[in-house]
Each structure stands twice: as structure tokens, then as C-alpha cells.
Amino acid sequence: MRVFHSVRNLHSWRTKQELLEGPIGFVPTMGALHDGHLSLMQRARKQCRTVVVSVFVNPLQFGETEDLGRYPRSFRADRRLCREAGVDLLFAPPPEEFYPANFQTTVTVNRLTRRWEGEARPTHFQGVTTVVTKLFGLVRPHLVYFGQKDYQQCLVVNQLIQDLNWDMRMIRCPTVRESDGLAVSSRNRFLSAHQRVQAGLLSKALRQGSDVIRTGIRNVRTIQSRMEKIFGSDPDVHLDYLAICDSKSLEPLTQVGGTVVILGAVRLGTIRLIDNLLVRCP
Amino acid sequence: MRVFHSVRNLHSWRTKQELLEGPIGFVPTMGALHDGHLSLMQRARKQCRTVVVSVFVNPLQFGETEDLGRYPRSFRADRRLCREAGVDLLFAPPPEEFYPANFQTTVTVNRLTRRWEGEARPTHFQGVTTVVTKLFGLVRPHLVYFGQKDYQQCLVVNQLIQDLNWDMRMIRCPTVRESDGLAVSSRNRFLSAHQRVQAGLLSKALRQGSDVIRTGIRNVRTIQSRMEKIFGSDPDVHLDYLAICDSKSLEPLTQVGGTVVILGAVRLGTIRLIDNLLVRCP
């Protein structure tokens, strides 16, 4: 496995790749790799001649009050995991090369970013779409791998791919979960024992919503109140949103039908967790 | 010469190009091709194995009150000129394929677009950088050709290339001028005989500024007033700006020094013309 820390190395490597056959698969990450990332790499390894992983904690996608400074960093463990997963190239640029002082470009996807995570974290998706534009332009992959856990991000990046006419396809991979249903996330390591129990309630609430929909109930308010009951009255759990939306536009619904997505976000102390479930209505 | 009207054709063509050696040169245009564009194509033809020209009147870079509807369109003449110039591929997508109804992405370069054309035309550069991001991603050229006449545009696009880490180089080509100094432009064809005479004053004023600087005068207000005198008191000439700026940041100067750029914009009736001169101070 090669490890590049510089854009220049990536440029010359990519030029040589043009002479080889078969797809390049790309897994962009912020490091602190876990089983969710591993599942993306394994999928890429199965489908592609060349697998590229980036590890870059992107400052642009953190708000001013968010956890950039304490976001977990574990480069040596990440590198080992990539090597074991059969990754061909690990790209980990230093922030000061990636965003020099004179950097002044922003890439924005508009409609899809207005609600949910976009509302809770106003500059977040701009940061994601800007870094992804840079990384995709550098790596020029044929297939890109994202986890469904960040469902809105998947839709936003896919819209970016369509809008900018990139000749690539997104592979959205299923959310990897702990035994109690909690979606694996780099931020889970910060949970106290008590918070870890509370965190499990989010996926439980989503499954509750899915179960209620499957019983034939269509009214979103009814479904929502059944989901909210899962959290009880724990004052340490702050529910940001539990929304039932059109699975493509992410607009909230009042009556479910077709394929919907249930989106949830909770805050436990300073830790914010998100999750979602796609539900096909019976 | 091939002519493609669809993104799909361009994708498969570009994939094949990866197997060939030598640079791809790209001249993005809005059609209505003139001697300025021709000079870009000729330069590209000399330097590149493959020359790609796009003809696309980009609606995003016109303001709501601007001249999108009457912008000159002459595809058959453009195609002939490209063929004669030895262009390999002419790409002319229909607007409805390029910007489908669900399109929602914007690419913005921030600081460099605040002043001058960015101030006079608030959404203009966003339109330019968005279309250029799409076109560069499609064509994936090694060299891109722009005319110095749109000096701020050259800086903005070059910043975009740096910021997004594209592995390409901009070739900024000299402004092509009529015998009286007027910069050639697709909009010149709309000038009445009287306006055509007035239009010549803009380049004359810029040369005047350059001459004054060469005499050793450093005070920008003094230089500006000498340039403004060229226009006399013609009520039909509206001077948008005549600015003397740092040639890299485009910030206005009070004292000239080093290499400066004189930027000018005038309105004659509904026609707006821009021009500039780079001046190395003695």
C-alpha cells in the first residue's frame, strides 16, 4: 500500500493510472476508522482494480462551536486497517497544504441541504461538498463509497455528482450496527456508560417507527409520537429531530407512502448522533 | 472534427483519450466566435495534441436584467471557424441537458469576486465558476486557454484551479484589438456607428493611464483623472469604473508600484464593455 501526504504525489500517480484498465474505487473518510469504514473498503476491494482511501479531518465541515479539535485522530491504526483491508493507496494530506491561506472556493448544493443536518449545522454540507469536489477531482474515481448512516450526505453528494456531470457512481453501503442497533460512529467512543445506553434508544426509536408504519398507520404525527415515547422523559437526552421524509427530496411528509426515510438526531451532553432507516410502506 | 451535443458522448470520448499521450487543450467559449477566440484556439493548436472547444451560452453567468436573450448565437459560423482552426472536438450541449430542472449546485470563489465585475454583476462569477467546474470536469484538460480581456475572470478561474487542486495550467492569452485599440468582443456587433467611436475611448483611456504611469506619476487619483478626461463630457457614455489595482489581488491602490492592472468598464446605452491593461511601473 502506498501512502501519500501530498497533492503532487497524487497527481502523478493518477496520471499513470489512466493507462491501466479497470475501475478506481474511492472511500473518503475523516479517519478514526471503524467497522463502518471497513465495510466500505471491503465493498470497494471486491468491485475495483484500485482502491483509494483518504484520511482527512476536514475543518470546513465543522461549525465554529463543534468538535473539530477533539475529533478522534488515530493515523497509525487507520493505516494498519487500510493495509489489512487491501487498500492500494492511502491519501492523507496535511490541512495546510489542502487549504492554503489563500483558499477561497466554496461548493454548495442548495435545496437538499436546507433541512435536517443542514439546519442543525449551517456550514456543514458546504464543507462536505467542497472537500469532496477537491478529493474527487484529485482521485478521479469511477466508484465512490459512502455509508447510509449519513443518509442526507449520500443524497447531497450524489446530487453533486449529477450536477457536476462527474463520470462516477455512488455505492451507498448499509449502516453497520452494534448488537443493540446503535450505528457505529467515530463519535461513539466518547459516550459514557450511561450515554451508551441512551444512544441505543435512537435506533430503537427508528425501528419503532418502521414497525408502526408496517402495521399500516399512515399519519406521521401518530408515528412520531410512538417513536418519541421510546426516549421516555430522560432530561439528558435532547432530541434534535425525528422526521419522516420523502426518501429522495427529504421533504417532511404528513402521510407516509411509497419509500420513506426516517431521520433522527439526538444530543447526549456534547455528543451528537444521527441515524436513519429506509422504510418501504406496505 | 467531432461535434458532441451530449455529456454522455463526451464521457466516453474522454475515457478513450486517457490511453493517448500528450496534452489536451481546452477553450471554453459562449460562441459568437471572433478573432479573440481564434487566437486562443491557435495557441492551443500549437501546444496540444488534442484541442477541445465548448460553445455554450451559460445562463448562470447572466444577471436577471442582462442580455442572455439577445446574446449573439451563430453556431454554424462557430463550427466552421473551429473546423478551420483545426479543433478536434467541439462540445455544444443543450442548456436543458447541462442544467436539468433538479440542478442545485453552485461553485463560488469568494474574495477575488467581490469587486469590479463581481460588484457590477453580483451572480456573474458564480455562474462562470460553476460552468467552468462542470466543463473542466468533463473535458479534464491539461491546459486551458482564456483571454486577458476578461482579466478578473482569468484570476478567478486560476484561483479555482488552485483551490480545487486541478492538475491543469491556465494559458492567459493577450487581448486581440481592432485598429483603434477596441478589444474585440462578441458584444461589439451591437454598437451603433456613434457608439463604436465612443467604445474606442475605453482602450484609449487605459493607454493614457499606462502612459501617465510611465512618466513616473504614482498617485492613483491623478492618473485616474487624466484617464477620465479622455471620455470628455459625453452624456451617452456611462463610466462604471476605471480602477488601478494590484495585479494579483485586484485590490485598488492609492499609489502605483510593481505590476498593476488598470481595469475599465463602460456602458453605452444597454451595451456594457470591459477592458484592461497590465502595466509594469518603471
Image (cartoon, coloured by chain):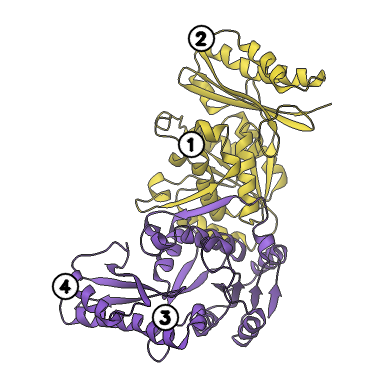
Chain colours: A purple, B yellow
> Is B64 left, or right, of A66 in this rendering?
left
Residue sitting nearer the eye, A189 or A56: A189
Q: Point out the tag, 2 or 1, that comes first from the N-terminus.
A: 1
Using the rendered view, name the quadrant where residue A54 is placed. bottom right
The verdict on a common chain for dots 1 and 4 is: no
Residue bearing the label numbered 3: A175
What is the spatial separation of the Cα atoms under label 1 and label 3, in whole angstroms?
A: 42 Å
Residue bearing the label numbered 1: B122
Identified at 63% across, 31% down, the residue is B149
> Is B26 left, or right, of A47 in this rendering?
right
Q: Chain of mark 4?
A: A
What is the spatial separation of the Cα atoms under label 1 and label 4, in whole angstroms?
A: 46 Å
Q: Chain of mark 1?
A: B
Residue type marked 4: Arg
Per the image, label 2 sits on a secondary structure element best described as loop
Residue bearing the label numbered 2: B235
Residue B222, percent from left and from top = 71, 17
Residue bearing the label numbered 4: A218
